[in-house]
Image (cartoon, grey):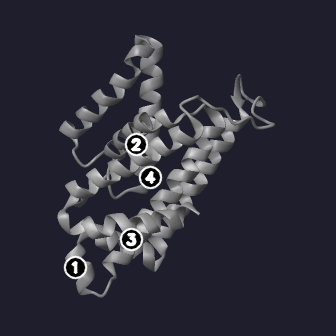
Amino acid sequence: ILFFLGAAIYRVLLQPLLKGGIIFTLILTFAVRLIVENILLKVWSADYRTIRLSYAGSNFQFGNAYIPLIRFLAFIIAVVVIYLTYLFMMNTRTGKGIQAVALDKEGAQAVGIDVEKMYMINFALGTALAGLTGSLWASIYSFSPHLLGPIVGKVFIIAILGGLGNIWGAAAGGLVLGFAETAGAAFLGSEWQEAIGMVIMVSVLVWRPYGLMGKKFFG
């Protein structure tokens, strides 16, 4: 459902503004985010909600550690989805078309790739993956429409850390950010948790602008 919703949003809202440049596109996508957030606030209010699954309190032992089952399952699902996305991008004509457009839009058009179609599929796929990510998040944490802002902020940090043009880089960026925030909160206090992510992001931008695993030609 979210795939088709993303495709519709692209066709109706984003496609007409692509010629205006990246700034117009960013402004519009943030506007869409605010609209969605306010609709959710109107329908469900700002109260935090929790999804209670039957196995939410289950754990299993791995060595001397007890691992929550729900977090382990979320991790496995995430790894599988990342791998399937990687296979799609590397082994299908559409995936290769998306990469070609990202590398060189004019060159892709010259060899007959439908650039607008690739943009639409890419945005729709991203929307569907965002919905899946939200479902996994909601199965573990309490959630509210007000969480959209902080989550989007973390997504930007992860994208910069991992680097553009590398799907596994996004996974690596998420692991680096998660470990850094957890370790930082343990040693420095939870009030430093958000700042640590920003410091790491700025450091990566200065040291390696194309990300830890990104490709220079995407930078």
Identify which residue is drawn at 43% across, 44% down: 172
Q: Which residue is mark 1?
A: 107
Q: Which circle, 1 or 2, is nearer the viewer?
A: 2
**Residue 65: image location, x then y, percent:** 69, 24
Question: Which one is earlier in the sequence, the residue at label 2 or at label 3?
Answer: 3
**Left or right: residue 143 compared with residue 19:** right
Question: How far is disc 1 from disc 4 in space, using C-alphas?
Answer: 26 Å
Between tags 1 and 3, which lies in front?
3
Residue 77: x percent and y percent?
Answer: 63, 50
- Seen in the image, is 202 located left or right of residue 143? left
**Distance CA(mark 2)–CA(mark 4):** 14 Å
Q: CA distance from mark 3 to mark 4?
A: 29 Å
- Of 63 and 190, which appears nearest the observer? 190
Q: Which residue is mark 3?
A: 11
Q: Is residue 207 visible?
A: yes
Percent x, y of residue 190: 45, 15
Q: Between disc 2 and disc 4, whose residue precedes?
A: 2
Name which residue type carries label 4: Trp
> Callout 2 environment at 10 Å: few (<14), some (14 to 19), or many (20+)?
some
- Residue for badge 2: 155
